Image: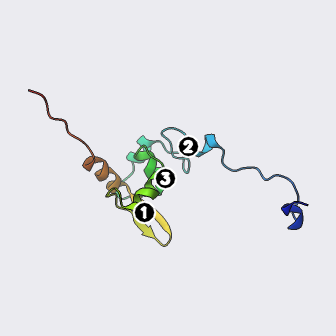
Amino acid sequence: MSLANLAGTSSKQVPVSRTKAAKKTAGTCAENNLSREALLALPPDTLLRPSPAAVVLHSTAGTLAVWRSTKRYPLNYVRLGSKIFYRLSDVQEFIARSTVVVAERI
């Protein structure tokens, strides 16, 4: 007897809401389907959830979670209750601070 039968529910399979293809598409945010360019065009004080912020950074929401927990990189974030947000201006400043300028060879 399966757990579904014990719980009094049917044994039909529930469709998976997110497939691998739907989880991450290159350069777009799966949550609201905005491209990186569209996200960068938003006002600087816009609060982004981790997934859209990761799109701007060419990273993943999981990587941002590791950075937050380990304090590995100085990327500011906003915590409202249990929700995490990144201010677009903070993400853009982080990118600017991370830019490496290579000197010309003489």
Marks 3,1: beta carbons within 8 A: no
* Mark 3 residue type: Ala
The residue positioned 56% from the left and 47% from the top of the image is 30
Q: Where is residue 48 in the image (x, y as percent from the top left)?
A: 44, 56
Q: Residue 97 carries which label?
A: none
Residue 48 position (above or below residue 21)? below
Please give the residue where the numbered disc 3 appears in the rendered image: 61
Q: Mark 3 to mark 1: distance in Å?
A: 12 Å
Image quarter for residue 101?
Answer: top left
The residue positioned 88% from the left and 56% from the top of the image is 11
Q: Nearer the viewer, mark 3 or mark 1?
A: 1
One can see residue 48 in this view? no
**Residue in front for this viewpoint, 72 or 49:** 72
Please give the residue where the numbered disc 1 appears in the rendered image: 69
* Mark 2 residue type: Lys
Please give the residue where the numbered disc 2 appears in the rendered image: 24
Mark found first going from the N terminus, 3 or 2: 2
